[in-house]
Image (tube, helix red, strand yellow):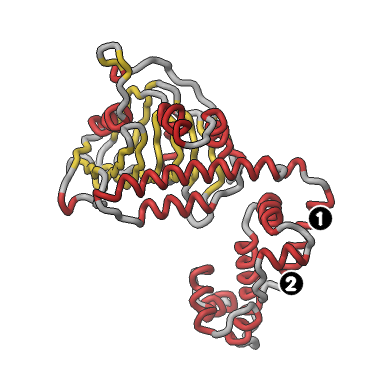
Amino acid sequence: MQSAVVVLTAEKFVPESEKKGGLLVENIIEQIFEPQFRQISLHPVSGTAQIKGSGITYRPAPDVGDGYYWVQPIRDLCAVTIVDLTFKKEIELNYEHPSFLAVGNYAPPVVPHFQENTAASYSTQCAKTKNHLIGYINDASRFRAGISAGGAMRCVSVTMLLRYFRSFLPKYFSVDQQELVYSVEGLADMVTMPELEYLFAQICRINPSVKSGNLYFESKVLELLSLIQIQQERQKEFPDISALDEDTVAMIHRVAAFLQNHCEQHFTLETLGKIFYTNKNKLSYLFRLVYNESIPGYIQKMRLEKAKKQLEYPGISIYEIAHSIGFKNQGSFSDWFRKEAGFSPSEYRNKVNRWD
């Protein structure tokens, strides 16, 4: 899937929840999340019903659905969330919210709701999942979405009110708020970003205590913002595909041909950079730009194609095939092949050689 930027308009207003006695009082739970929770009947739980030691776990009423919505608020201005909900009946969301910025890893059923409600920047699909990395800045508006019975909502995300990156971040870090906005919007220009995928996986996996939760999850927020800005700096350093000259594209094609002919060998990026007289980071970036996949991913694909081709010939043993594509033993090869192809080598061989 290619990157795309979806730009939509929203009904602008200043939510009444932001006004208290003429003073601006910001609380991300009250302003962003509780309006959702009320409409889909989510309630905070305690004890073993919680999914993590810190934060707040919300669960739906039994007649509404199954799963959870976990929120870790940070300084009342930011929140880390993990959502895994399946609905038993149709859900209608219609609520006001203030302006905010968000970056998340969203499963496909959620993505259309962003197309209807936000000006969002989409990266390509994540390398190991069908999810999408999405970054967006949403002005104060009204969110409207419908989720049908049996529908799901699954995502890991970081959401922050504007004051978090307009006031708090610049006070303690050398963060330019406009640069940060550009960086989030720049997600649309990325081919992929495995560092962000890994960060979101860590958020799901790590389970800190109440005492350490705030510190840990705020560190993840800061890491996320720094990774996005670093990626933007890389984007400025390296061109996009439309700006590549013929010699550069030809060099990348030579790299691909080399990898295809030597897929049984285990080259590091540093070694490949030396072979083709280029910086390893630039080589990695350019290869992904031209082929829309990583060099390790391309090598795996070439190995799989070579293995499948050889399995068409009964005279070549599985042991020989394993060694021909760089595996030291047949067992490791068989495990890898089953994972990649969905069949064991023997099953695949029988399948392609079976007479109908």
Label placed on residue 261 = 2
Task: Tell me if 352 is positioned left or right of 37 in this view.
Answer: right
Please state which amino acid type lies under the numbered disc 2: Asn
Mark 1 crowdedness (10 Å alpha carbons): few <14, some 14-19, many ≥20: few
Please state which amino acid type lies under the numbered disc 1: Ala
Task: Tell me if 259 is positioned left or right of 12 in this view.
Answer: right
Query: In the current view of this chain or complex, which residue is farthest to the right?
Result: 247
Question: Image point 55% across, 85% down: which residue?
Answer: 329
Question: Image point 31% across, 38% down: which residue?
Answer: 73
10 lies above or below 286: above
Residue 69 appears in the figure: yes
Question: Image point 33% across, 22% down: which residue?
Answer: 96
Percent x, y for residue 345? 54, 78
Question: Image point 44% across, 45% down: which residue?
Answer: 105
Give SS at disc 1: helix
Instruction: Report the Cα–Cα distance between label 2 and label 1.
Output: 17 Å
Query: In the current view of this chain or complex, which residue is farthest to the left?
Result: 47
Q: Quadrant of residue 100?
A: top left
Percent x, y for residue 46? 16, 47
Q: Quadrant of residue 39?
A: top left
The residue singled out by tag 1 in the image is 250
107 lies above or below 176: below
Percent x, y for residue 143? 37, 26
Question: In the depicted view, which residue is nearer to us: 208 or 296?
Answer: 208
Percent x, y for residue 273? 73, 62
Question: In the depicted view, which residue is nearer to us: 285 or 106?
Answer: 285
Question: In the depicted view, which residue is nearer to us: 293 or 74?
Answer: 74
Q: For the image shown, how many numbered marks are present on the structure?
A: 2
Mark 2 crowdedness (10 Å alpha carbons): few <14, some 14-19, many ≥20: some
Q: Quadrant of residue 244?
A: top right
Give SS at disc 2: helix
Residue 112 appears in the figure: no
